[in-house]
Structure formats: C-alpha cells, structure tokens
Amino acid sequence: MIELRDLTFAYDDGPRILDGVDLTVEEGELVLLAGPTGVGKSTLLGAVAGLVPAFSGGTVSGDVLLDGGSILELPARERAHAIGFVGQNPSAWFVTDTVEEELAFGMEQLGLAPATMRRRVEETLDLLGIAELRQRDLRTLSGGQQQRVAIGSVLTMHPRLLVLDEPTSALDPTAAEDVLATLTRLVHDLGVSVLLAEHRLERVVPFADRMALLGGDIDRPGLLRVGETAEVLADAPIAPPIVELGRAAGWQPLPLTVRDARRRARPLLADLGEPPVRPRPPVVDTTPVVDVRRLVGGPAHVPVLREIDLQLQRGTVTALMGRNGAGKSTLLWTLQGRLRPDRGDVVVAGADPHGRSAEERRATTGLVPQSPADLLYLETVAEECAAADGDAGRPGRTRELLDRLAPGIDPDQHPRDLSEGQRLALAVAIVLAASPQVLLLDEPTRGLDYPAKAALAEVLRDLAAEPGAERAVLVATHDVEFVARAADDLAVLAEGEIVSHAPVARAVGESPAFAPQVTKVLGEGWLTVDQVREALP
Amino acid sequence: MAGRIPRDLHPVAWWVWAIGLAVGATCTTNPFLLAILLAVVTLTVLSCRGDQPWARSFRLYVWIGALVIVTRILFRIVLGGDVPGQVILRLPDIPLPDVAAGISLLGPFTREELLASSYDGLRLAALLIAVGAANALANPKRLMKSLPPALYEVGTAMTVAISVVPQLADSARRVRAAQELRGAAAGRFRRIRGVRRLLVPILEDAFDRSLALAAGMDARGYGRTGESTPAQRRTTGALMLVGLSGVCVGVYAVLDATAPRVLAVPLVVAGTAVALVGMASAGRRVGRTRYRADRWRLPELLVALSGVVAGAGLWAVQRWQVDVAHPGVLEVPEIGLGAVAVILVGVLPVWVAPPPLTASTQPTATAALRAPAEAVAAR
C-alpha cells in the first residue's frame, strides 16, 4: 500500500539520517519501528506523513509511493485523506478545545458532508471509548485520554495508514494497553495499516506483525532492517527484557510474549534456584529522612492528595507509580516545599519544607521536573555548569557530577542540542550541585532507550548509596522495567492515597499491572535479566 | 420551558438582539426607560446564559457600567460649570489661569447637574451592559465559526490565538516553579538575568508548540487547495482587493466633508458589493464544511427580531416623542406606554430562547463534573 524506495535524508552536509531506506507496509498490517534514541525514527515517520523535509529542513531523495503513485512532492495536507499522523506530544497538536470539535477538524478540512461528519464522530467516540468525554475541554484530559483523542482526530478522516510516534510513552501501563488494544482493533476490524515508533518495546512487540529496526548497524546507522519481529530482535542493540531473557537462556526462536516465555521457563526455573535478594547499602542513620503523615493537599486547595503516609530512608531508591493524574507530581512538589500541605505533617530532613527559604529547600531537596528543559536557559553547557556552581558555591562541582552521569559532553554545545538522556543528566547534575539529601525525579525515563535507562538506573542507585552521603531517592515513573532495575521499594499511589509501599520484588509480585516481564515469566522475586544471568550456572 | 431541548442559540442572534437594545439605549436619556431596559437585559442574561467561562463576564460589565456613571458624576463635579439651580454641594470655585480661559474647577454643584450627568452616565452604562450581555450569552468560538466560508482561515487563526493565552500561562507557571529549583540569580544584573531565565524557556516552549501545532494542522489537511484553478483564485483576489479599496476610499470620503460627494456613499456601496461578490466567489471554491454548524431557526429569528423591535421602537420614540426620550431635569420624567412596550419586547428571549447548555442539562456531563483539573493542576 505505502512503499518507501531508497529513501535517503540528510541535513545539509550532515551525515545521512536515513540511508537508502526500503519499506513496504501492506493493507491491515502493524509495523513497529524501533531504534536507539535520536537515530531518526521520527524523521522516517515524518517523511511518510509529508512533514519532512517541509518542517525540518534537509534534503530527501528516493521516493514514497502510495498505491504505486509517487507522493514525495505532495505536502502533508494533501496526503491527509490517506495518511493519518499523530505526533509525539498530542496536547501540542490540538487545534480546537473540545473533544468533539477536535475529532471533526480534519473532516472539515476534507470537506465532508455534515451528516457524514456527524456519523463518523459518533462512531469514533465509541470505537475509542471516549463517548463520555465529548464535551470536555481538551486541556483537562489525562494523558491517556488525550492520546486517544489525538488518534481519533485522524481516524475520523478514515485514513488507510496510521502513523504514530511513541503513542504510549507518556502513559501509565494500563492506559498504554488500552491504546494498543484500540490500535489492534483498528487493524483487525477496519483493515487500517499502522506504522508506529516506540521505545518501550515490551509494550508493543506482542502486537506487531513485522518490525523495522533503524540504527542496528553501527557503521551505517541510517540503514533500515525489516523482517519478522523475532528475527530482527535476535541481535538488535535494543530489545525488551523478555528477548534479553530468551537470549540469556539460549531459547530458539526468541519468545515475544509472556505466554510463550512462561511455557519455556519451567526447566530454566529449576536451574535458577531461589531468587536473589537485592542488597541494601549499610546505613548508619536509620531515622527516615522524609516523614509524611496524614498529608492532605494539592494545588489551589483541590485535595489531590488524601491522607498520605510515607517514610523514606537514606540509601534507598523508591519508585512512585500510579495512573496518570493520580497525584505523583503533586506529592513531589509538596515534598520539595513549593506546595503547602492543607493538613498533616511533612518533615524532610528535620523540618517542614514549606517553611524553609528557597535556598534551604535546594540544599535539602533536589527535584528534577518533568521537562528538564525548563531548568535550562543559557547558551552552552559550560555556562549552565558555571551558573550552578556559582549558586552552590562550589566551583567545578557540576561538571564533575555531569561527567559521572554522562561522560564526554562537549562543554560548548547548546543544551537544546543535547540528546534527551544528556539533557536529563545535565538537569540532574545542576540539581545535585547543591548536595541535597533527598532527590526527587519526575518521569525521568521519557524518550530514553534501554541502554540509557540502564545507565540512569545505575546512576540513581550509586547516588542513593554514595558512602558518607547516603540519599533518599524518589522517582515518579510509569516504566515498570525501569522500576525493576532501579528501585528498592515501590510505592503505589491511587486516588491520592498510598495503596502499597513495599520492597519492589514483593510489591510487583502482588499487582500484575506493575509487574515487569521477568516477574511475569519467572514468578515473584525475579526482577531483571541481569539477576537471571548471574544466577545461571 | 419544559420539553424544549437545551442547545446554544446562534451567536449572531444574540448579537443582533444586544445591538438592537444598545441602539435603543443610545436613543434615550430617560432614567425610567433606561432602568426598564437594564432590567430586561439582566433578566435575559440571568435566565439564558450557560455555565461556560464567558458567561461569567456579565458581572464585569455591570461593574464597568457602575464605574461609568460614577466617573461621569465626578467629572461634572470637578469641571462644574455654572448651571443655575438648587445647590446641593457647595464647593470653592477655582478659576484656571487665562491660558484655559473660561474654565473653572469645582464650584457649586446643583441637583440639576447631578441629574443630567447621571442620566448621561446611565445611557452609556446601558449601552455597555447590553454589549456585555451579548458577550455573556454568545459563545465567542461559535461566533468565529459563523464567519462566511471565505474567512474560515481567519476564524481558525483566532480560535488558535484564543487557546494560546491559557497555554502560555500554564507554561509560565511550570517554568517559574522549575526555576525555583535552581539558585536565585545573583550579582549586578540580577533583575535582567531573572527575566531572561524565565523568558528563554517559556519562549522556547511557545515556539516548539507553535511548530508542533502547525505540523499537526498540516497533517490534518488544513489549507488544502481543493480544486480551484489559479485563474479562479486570481479573480477572487482581484475582486476582494478592488472591493476593499473602494470601501476604504468611500468611508474616507463620507467622513471628510471636503471630498467630492460622488466618492462618498456611492463608492462605499459599490465597494461593499464588489467585496461581497469576491467573498461569495471565494466561498464557492472552498472545499471545507462545518461540523454541526449553528442553524438559523425560529427562536433565533424571534430573538433577533425582539432586539430589532426594541431598538427601532426607541429610535421612533426619540424621533416623535422627544420629551419622553430626553426629559428635562426640572421635573419628574414622564414615560409613555408605547416606549415601555417596545422595551418590554426585548425580554422575549426569556420565553423563546432554548434553555442553555449547562453541566446539569448536558446528557454526558457527569464526567465533566468530576475534578478534571487534576492532571493539569498537578504540573
């Protein structure tokens, strides 16, 4: 149906981002596009939709064919009837302000008859399960709802190909499954073709018919490898935990679903023996550094948090999970001290954080906000580091931290030109420069690939257990695999209450929605593939 | 009211109604007539408005109206003037130097002055409040959508512009919170650095957003050229340009008494006609449609008519019953039965307009009532 032929793309005199890409997507097929961070997945999707090079600059050669006819020269708006594109951040894409009008916007552009529009809006509302949201203001929707509205807003045009850029990256595990289930339904029932890019392969691999891997070849990162999912994943540099497990255990062919893997895991379990217990660093001071009792609060006196009880100790990494809008960010900002609790006691390092001055807050609690770019405002990395040093009164400290987190960043680079992972590292370094005893991170894994997430997990564990300066680390995240790697404890937040707070292995064993793939396959106690590798004889 | 389906009335109908009443208000200084008119407007707004944000703006207009009356009276006290009559406030007279010959400040303030200035102020206030009523009753976004097809692009641009402001506010709040996590700016240029560290991320965010929005609109077919040929497009463009230039010159001639009369009214009319033809031609080739466009039905017609009748009626009162429309300040103003009747026509919308869409009348509104702001507020 759609065919890319020898598609090559490069920014002027830069290396080739896409290097002779050939890809065919058939009718009713779901193709998964994967690859390390920053390798050009979005560029490829943009070229299919017609936004590259119009919105990015650079030059394209080769051809894009729709049903055999070339559409390379057509701008995105003239392809809209056949190709529906949903970008990375759906909330930035909304044109109107209610759900119903947003769904109709594309159809208005196509000039469909009012009766047809009316019917399709109703159908789409039902198909995506958002009928009760029809009059709602788009800005008040949760992440999962926004994502579904964004998909709906292109679906109403009845495109034959849906192109999606990281549709589940901002969603909690349950909402992500909802969105993916919806996509599968479209593929099966309506014969829509789907081309989607995703970092969290563990979520998408079971749904994919075929897989395309960009950046698999280190010498020519612009090459695209297309094939059966299991085949492509066999030696891909990025793979979901279940595939890593298969590789470690030497299973052929590789399992792609938890069900597959579980069937083969029985003999392996006998070899493995008892699951290991994650060692905790020896901590002298065992009084909780964060002590929250019966906290009620939220911005503008809306009680987002209702009676929170939470104790955090030095030397531990605690993950905070919960569905979109459950109050995770609110809790972090309350611990930081910016938000004032309406009732209850919050004690961080011996005092109420809201009563502290801004400088004292920085010295006790470091918070890395959801979009780290909000912290950065200078032209070069070196200037950012110098500014942070000046504030902390310790020259050279920020750069030293940065080199530990992400070595080798060019000090003359502009912070906006850094990769997601590097920018996050810079923000963490700036926050850590003031040597806080408590470190809070809000959704740090967005846009990171598996190696980057593993590195971040390592760094967080080191920071928590740093001898002589043990810290309490609290990470709000949706990423269960990251939690399995990084955290000691897991706290689950629902409806403004902590519904469970226990060591990770036990907590994820109890709730399947938050269980990482290795736990699902091998049972309670096993969290990561690394543990399995070590236990294997 | 029972049995009627709640829906939004066509925004243009509300505007016609409100402009009718506003015209009526300018035609009289009779305080009793104006008070009746204000009561009509207020009653209509209270019974016909929905619960959207703009519906709450009416109170603001009422305050502005009150402010206008007070200001008017204060000015009259300060600038005074020697109107003979019953003095109610004896203030010292301050003659200004010769440069501003003839003007003196303060001076005795008479009851007649008080009445005259408050009648005048009341007229202005009624005008403002009538416009405020339209703002509170008509959905501004749907008004934009009622523009003729040729102006669709302008309408969409306005809709986007309206939604940008709250987004900027969100982004500013987020960045300010984030910046607090870093050290406060210090040193000689602290102020400038402080502004810069807020502005840079906010502007970056705004640029990213607008680029993403442009890409999103493009990917959904915004600005498709459709099937018109270049020749058609040129004709439309030429018609619009010629028509609008004609209107400009004509309006100038109307206002400038020394310009030849030939250029005045005839040119305005001709220019408007040509521009309308251009718009119609542009509208015909637009390949777009409207989702759930507001339809013009009987209630719309009645609401608009009631405003027109009230406006025209008061204009007639001013024309033929001058002492009712503009009573003197020496005796109690009289009111005519006819004048009261035409104003009362303006209250018709209370019965003919469909009940407004509110959270309790929307069939699917239960979800909207639950605190939905959480996700946003938590940022």
Image: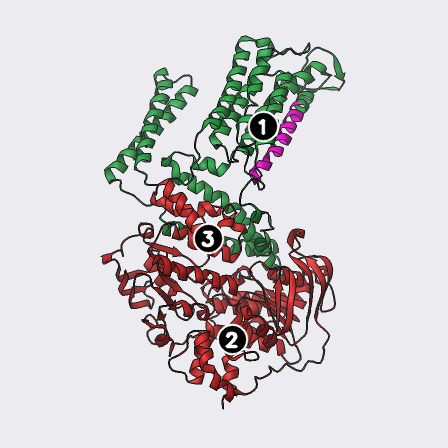
Chain colours: A red, B green
Q: Name the residue under label 1.
A: B44
Q: Are marks 1 and 2 on the same chain?
A: no
Q: In which quarter of the view is residue A502 placed? A: bottom right
Q: How far apart are marks 1 and 2 (CA)?
A: 63 Å
* Magenta residues, start to end: B50-72
Mark 1, other Cα within 10 Å: few <14 / some 14–19 / many ≥20: many
Query: Which x, y percent locates residue A296?
Result: 70, 58
- State which mark lies toward you, 3 or 2: 2
Q: Which of A9 and A152 is in front in this view?
A: A152
Q: What residue type is labelled 2?
A: Lys
Q: How far apart are marks 3 and 2 (CA)?
A: 31 Å
Q: How many marks?
A: 3
Observer able to see residue A52: no
Query: Which x, y percent locates residue B271?
Result: 34, 25
Label annotation for residue A520: 2
Query: Which x, y percent locates residue B301?
Result: 46, 25
Q: Is mark 2 on a helix, strand or loop?
A: helix
The residue lying at 72 percent from left, 15 percent from top is B110
* Magenta segment main secondary structure: helix
Query: Which x, y percent locates residue B156?
Result: 42, 42
Q: What element carries label 1?
A: helix
Q: What residue type is labelled 1?
A: Thr
Q: In this view, does B308 lie above or below A118?
A: above
Q: Which of B354 and A314 is in front in this view?
A: B354
